[in-house]
Amino acid sequence: MRYTVLIAILLCVFLGGCRQRVDSDQPGPQDVRNYGDLPGLRSTTDGKLREELDRIVEDGGTPEQLCKSGVPKSDNAAEELLVLFPDRRLDDLLCESEKLFPSGRFEFNPVELHRAIDFRKRHDAARLRARAALERPWCDFDIDFSAGFQADLKFIAAVRICARLEAFHAAEAIEAGKAADAVESLAVMLHLAQCLGAERHVEARLEAALLRTEAFNVLQAVVLSKNITPKDLERLQEIVQKQLEDWPDDAEAWIGDRAIGMHSYELVRDGRLTELLTLRELDLFAKEGKLKKLLAAARQNVDADQLHYLQTMRRIIDSCSRPYYQRTLLFNSIREELQRRRNSPEFPMVAGRLLLPDIQKGHAIQAQDRANWEAWALALALATARPLPVGRINPITGENYMHSKQNDRIVVENFGSGEQGDRPSISVPCLGEGNRGIGVRE
């Protein structure tokens, strides 16, 4: 259920609003890097726009500032993860692993399991190298924000492939009754997700959520597997709790997204708006007969458009200090404001049509990702008689998570979106006498 729901939302975001264009004829990253220091914005005479820029510079949020990593290569796991697979094979390997990964419960029939294990064996050297790399103290993929939407994000595919190799290793271990080995594969999956999620880039952050959703299903299979022991559950509780302790601030991804948005306005100023459009958008605007109007209006009103965008992004980033269900009023007001100005000459075309529409969906994914793992933390704490975690309110709905004891199992519910049909649950066995009194429904 978690995989199916989240993949649907992610497809909506990536296909509906992602600026990752599908073309090969545009100028390369070296060309667009010239916009990284925001020459057009820095030369503006608009006082309010200058104030927004000054705030962002003070906070270190420009594309150029976000490019400064400073992590020594010898201490950086990313240096090894980036060279595990040939670049030309990344898409094919990711697609192959996608086909092998179950779309629902993490279950395989004998033929499916054989194919998954074969894939794992063929790439086991890479899996083991990735594990060794994760022993390093840092993981920074050094995203080139100066390239804007043309930044190289191939590391995402490499990380996703490594995570699926660990998932298939876990499936093999579960089948063999080696729960402890499956637990360690789950730990590596979550470590890889942490590496992705720590990047200040929305696509990396949302892909981390999808990776963790796959790990969610693996974890459910692990805790219900044969030969699972109290020690295994305690180890899982520690792994999940560590994941929550290291959870990235929601705002970090949107600071990076704002930097890419600022870079986009430099292209607009230079008459290169079409390079920001996906093929779907180009076709849509052409059919509407609005492409020429869009290009002309965007360049003519670029300062006012960008001011609206930066002021709105400041409000959105500031809202990240509150749980998602408390941010919805802000998103409603942003949407209503854009709707009121839809037919006005002052309508911020770039912000309103390209950069802002799908941001709320991204925040919803972040919230669901967090809710999934807070629910797991609660379930595992109850099953192992550990202190209950602090996060016990669903950030999507504002409602309490629900837990009960059913036939010697802890069941946690009410961590979904609250929408019809989205009623996920977690089930963990109670192992040992210490858990006999647990499970009062809240």
Image (tube, helix red, strand yellow):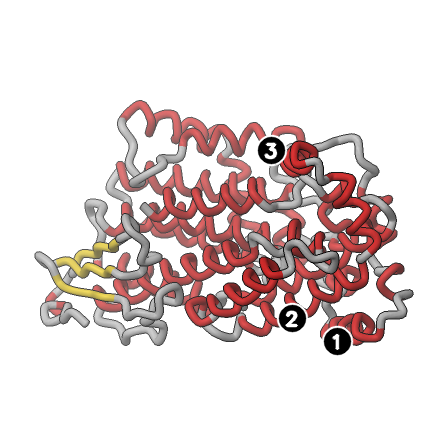
Residue assigned mark 2: 314
Q: Look at the numbered disc 2 and give the secondary structure of its residue.
A: helix
Looking at the rendered structure, the kind of residue marked 2 is: Arg
Residue assigned mark 1: 55
Q: Is residue 373 left or right of residue 52?
A: left
Q: Is residue 220 left or right of residue 289?
A: left
- Sort mark 3 into few (<14), some (14-19) or many (20+) by Cα contacts within 10 Å: some
Q: Would you say residue 248 is visible in this rendering?
A: no
Circles 3 and 2: CB atoms closer than 8 Å? no
Q: Where residue 90 is drawn, which disc sits there? A: 3
Give percent across and percent down for residue 312.
64, 67
Q: Is residue 355 left or right of residue 132?
A: right
Looking at the rendered structure, the kind of residue marked 1 is: Arg
Could you tell which of marks 3 and 2 lies nearer the N-terminus? 3
Give percent across and percent down for residue 416.
32, 57
Tell me the residue at 25%/52% (across/down): 223
Could you tell which of marks 3 and 1 lies nearer the N-terminus? 1
Tell me the residue at 79%/44% (across/down): 295
Q: Look at the numbered disc 3 and give the secondary structure of its residue.
A: helix
Above/below status of 342 relative to 374: above
- Sort mark 1 into few (<14), some (14-19) or many (20+) by Cα contacts within 10 Å: few
Measure the alpha-carbon separation of dots 2 and 1.
10 Å
Could you tell which of marks 2 and 1 lies nearer the N-terminus? 1
Q: Is residue 301 left or right of residue 375?
A: right
Tell me the residue at 53%/70% (across/down): 320
Q: Look at the numbered disc 1 and give the secondary structure of its residue.
A: helix
Location of residue 168 (image quadrant): top left
- Sort mark 2 into few (<14), some (14-19) or many (20+) by Cα contacts within 10 Å: some
Measure the alpha-carbon separation of dots 3 and 2.
36 Å
